[in-house]
Image (cartoon, helix red, strand yellow):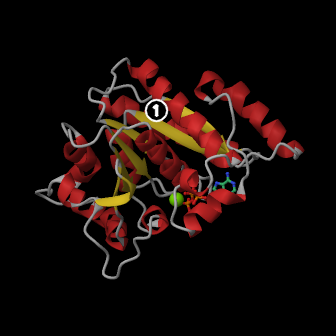
Amino acid sequence: MRVWCVANQKGGVGKTTTAMSLASGLAAHGWRALMIDLDPHASLSRWIGIDEDPAPRGTFELFGDPTPSLLSLVQSAGHAKLHLLPAQPALATLERQSANRPGLGRALVTALSKNNDFDYAVLDCPPTLGVLMVAALAAADLLIVPTQTEPLALHGLSAMVRTAEMIERSRGRPLPIAIVPSMFDKRTRAAVDSLADMRMRFGERVWDEEIPVDTRLREASRQHLTPEALDPKARGASAYARLCDWAIEYDLRSTAAPATAKAS
Ligand SMILES: Nc1ncnc2c1ncn2[C@@H]1O[C@H](COP(=O)(O)OP(=O)(O)OP(=O)(O)O)[C@@H](O)[C@H]1O
Ligand SMILES: [Mg+2]
């Protein structure tokens, strides 16, 4: 299983929208895709219509000992090949526990390694640098960083890249980074200038296109649909479909370790 981690220490940059769109793109290609909601606010879980009280079993259980099997925790997410591990508010308590439980940062490495039930896991991180993000980065084969094309966002991007480099050093395994310019509005000077700045500073780690501002992405979450199911020709959905194709290639190129089994 390939593990893609969608993260940025800055909030509201399009992480959840990117995780949803990439996972549904992978499923549309025939891959068995698992979305893992790591955000205690559970935006991704709500997107697919899971809003249960009490919260369902899901991501929190992966931080327990022993961990149940992934298949016993996942829920179907509107496509035969797409599943979700829902988030619970209790995930927030892990930050407090992490001081006394040093193994928490490696919980996802243990839970996801050697899993053959899915071809890809796509992790949606909360916008804070804590044990949840560290656990996600430790397990990631590819880090995808949606970044808004605005001047302040570049500071957040630099912080995220430094964090990734720190994790890379501590785990002793490369962590390729793919930066995705998000919510791009080509009519504004600030967006165009910030995009140029991003490309100059981060070079070929930046996707060579942009995700445009498209209100249908928000509408898709409101209607509990994948963007593609709402309107595959919409600008946002089609940009994400191209991003998915690029990310598959980028992942293979960066690691030279292809996913092994494509589902029929
Ligand atoms: N390309 C886009 N065009 C217009 N709206 C967008 C776009 N991408 C995301 N949005 C909207 O912007 C808001 C924030 O997006 P999203 O929830 O994906 O960001 P996030 O980084 O996951 O946020 P958080 O840090 O709170 O988890 C949502 O209302 C979403 O529908
Ligand atoms: Mg989010």
Q: Quadrant of the C terminus?
A: top left
Residue farthest to the front, as pictured: 264
> Residue shown at 46%/32% (left/top)?
165
**Figure check: 250 above or below 132:** above
Q: Quadrant of the N terminus?
A: top left
Q: Is residue 3 left or right of residue 112?
A: right
> Residue shown at 75%/36% (left/top)?
195
Question: Residue 238 placed where, x, y %?
Answer: 63, 42
The foreground one among 13 and 134 is 13
Q: Is residue 29 left or right of residue 210?
A: left
Q: Is residue 155 visible?
A: no
Q: Amino acid at mark 1?
A: Glu
Ligand 1 is within 8 Å of the C-beta of the residue at disc 1: no
The foreground one among 42 and 33 is 33
Q: Is residue 212 visible?
A: yes
Q: Give the residue at mark 1.
A: 165
**Figure check: 194 above or below 174:** below
> Residue shown at 37%/72% (left/top)?
89
**Figure check: 130 above or below 50:** above
Question: Residue 258 placed where, x, y %?
Answer: 34, 22
> Residue shown at 44%/46% (left/top)?
23
Q: Is residue 226 left or right of residue 137?
A: right
Disc 1 is placed on an element classified as: helix
Which quadrant would residue 221 be assigned to in this image?
bottom right
Question: Residue 252 placed where, x, y %?
Answer: 42, 22
Question: Residue 227 placed where, x, y %?
Answer: 57, 54
